[in-house]
Image (cartoon, rainbow, N blue to C red):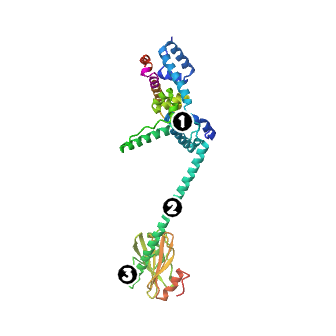
């Protein structure tokens, strides 16, 4: 008689045929000498047998057509296509709505927003007779003005040279805009007539292009270049500024 | 076993899947529903299957998880119903159920679902204990203790208080 005594787990594994050969022999030997355990094991074995025969025949109906893998695959594919179509239409609806909304907003802003209106205002304020007293930087040296602009803006466009039309820079002044610093450069000709060159960061409305606007006898010509918006504001009631205006917009009518 | 399985691979396993589903749900219609959702899950997750492992065990695993999820949902639903004053009535036994309720299955059906699943996987499907543990998502120690409990319960049911009282001392 050996001293081997199988655990409960060993007995289960014995019934289910999951023991290695050595342990199986040991369990057989043990059961030969222990009637009580042998009875238990025999009962389990019978349960196994009964269950197997009962459960193997438990499903009596033939396989329904809806369980066929081919059909399920096909339905999954159809369902996926429906989802994709649904998602696509959702995205389309959303983007149409967003786009439409944005356009409406643009139109609404455009109705109350005059591009570069602050440049026009700057002209009205500083193009008077005593303008020379109001500038921050009094110089007629274009390189100095350029240096001053470079300090306040990132890569601004070069200061325009209107000397061919009789206008010389007088000075520059820093202005405040709703989106940060703006700047104006004042030009004057020998008769004391003035032109304002204006630089500012883009505001709420990003997508207006080049254009012009006339308020009374003041013409504001504006365009976008790189990071900033630019404008040149000049008077229309004098022939002296006409060449300047034409230089900015070559296709401007000869009025 | 390759990662891809064909429709025929699945067709061969269908009887086993239906049997397992029936042992879980005990109603043939809901069993076939379970098989269907198991196959749908398996086919849509085909790419996520590990290369190694038995297709049958993998499908059993999916089915068992879905069954547990369904039970959890049903429990929540029953809770909701009881809030509104409707009792969770038992499903009426179907004709199929009556037909299959021979004595062995009657006893078997009285066991809790996790013991039924375990006995079927071990006794009928002949899965290794480790495979059963993987399928049911429990440690192997729990497999052994549940198996022991299930067999004890089955024996108690088999013998019954009237059947063979003298043998009850053995327990």
Label 1: chain letter:
B
Q: Is residue A111 above or below residue B115?
A: below
Looking at the image, do the residues carrying marks 3 and 1 touch, with CB atoms under 8 Å apart?
no
How much space separates mark 3 and mark 1, taking CA atoms? 91 Å
Q: Using residue A232 as the reference point, say whether residue B49 is left or right of it.
A: right
Chain at numbered mark 2: A
**Quadrant in which the N terminus of chain B is drawn:** top right
Residue range of the region highlighted in magenta in the rendering = B153-162
- At horizontal 45% and vertical 20% (from top left) the residue drawn is B163
Q: Earlier in the sequence, mark 2 or mark 3?
A: 2
Circle 2 sits in a helix, a strand or a loop, which is it? helix
- Residue B57, given in percent of the width and then of the height, sits at 55, 34
Q: Are marks 1 and 2 in contact (CB under 8 Å)?
A: no
Q: CA distance from mark 1 to mark 2?
A: 42 Å
Report the residue marked by disc 3: A133
Residue A254, quarter of the rendered image? bottom right
Confirm whether the magenta stretch covers residue B160.
yes
Residue A29 lies, in percent from the top left, at 53, 14
Residue at image mark 2: A93
Please identify the dominant SS of the magenta region.
Answer: helix
Q: Quadrant of the C terminus of chain B?
A: top left
Q: Secondary structure at mark 3?
A: helix
Instruction: Compare residues A80 and B102 and report the one nearer the observer.
Output: B102
Q: Pick whichever, B145 or A3, lies toward us.
A: B145
């Amino acid at each position: 008689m050996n001293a081997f005594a199988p655990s409960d787990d060993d007995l289960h594994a014995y019934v289910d045929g999951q023991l290695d050969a050595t342990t199986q022999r040991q369990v057989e030997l043990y059961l030969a000498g222990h009637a009580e355990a042998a009875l238990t094991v025999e009962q389990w074995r019978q349960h196994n047998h009964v269950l197997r025969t009962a459960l193997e025949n438990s499903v009596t109906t033939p396989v329904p057509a809806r369980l066929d893998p081919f059909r399920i695959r096909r339905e999954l594919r159809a369902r996926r296509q429906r989802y994709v179509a649904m998602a696509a239409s959702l995205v389309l609806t959303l983007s149409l709505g967003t786009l439409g909304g944005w356009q409406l907003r643009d139109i609404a802003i455009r109705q109350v927003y005059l591009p570069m209106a602050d440049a026009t205002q700057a002209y009205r304020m500083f193009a008077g007779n005593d303008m020379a007293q109001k500038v921050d930087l009094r110089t007629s040296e274009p390189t100095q003005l350029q240096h001053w602009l470079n300090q306040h803006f990132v890569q601004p466009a070069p200061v325009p040279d209107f000397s061919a039309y009789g206008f010389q820079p007088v000075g520059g002044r820093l202005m405040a805009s709703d989106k940060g610093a703006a700047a104006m450069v004042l030009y004057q000709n020998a008769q004391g007539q003035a032109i304002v060159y204006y630089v500012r960061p883009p505001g709420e409305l990003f997508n207006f292009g080049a254009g012009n606007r006339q308020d009374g006898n003041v013409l504001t010509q504006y365009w976008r270049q790189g990071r900033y918006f630019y404008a040149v504001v000049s008077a229309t009631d004098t022939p002296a500024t006409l060449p300047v205006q034409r230089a900015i917009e070559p296709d401007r009518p000869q009025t | 076993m390759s990662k891809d399985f064909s429709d025929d691979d699945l067709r061969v396993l269908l009887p086993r899947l239906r049997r397992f589903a029936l042992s879980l749900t005990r109603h043939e219609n809901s069993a076939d529903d379970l098989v269907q959702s198991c196959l749908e899950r398996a086919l849509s997750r085909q790419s996520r299957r590990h290369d190694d492992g038995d297709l049958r065990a993998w499908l059993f695993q999916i089915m068992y998880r879905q069954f547990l999820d369904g039970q959890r949902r049903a429990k929540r639903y029953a809770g909701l119903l009881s809030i509104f004053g409707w009792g969770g009535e038992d499903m009426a036994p179907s004709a199929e159920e009556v037909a299959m309720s021979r004595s062995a299955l009657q006893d078997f059906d009285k066991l809790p679902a996790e013991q039924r699943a375990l006995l079927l996987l071990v006794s009928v499907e002949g899965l290794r204990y480790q495979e059963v543990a993987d399928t049911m998502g429990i440690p192997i120690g729990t497999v052994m203790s549940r198996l022991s409990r299930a067999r004890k319960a089955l024996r108690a049911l088999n013998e019954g208080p009237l059947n063979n009282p003298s043998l009850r001392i053995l327990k």
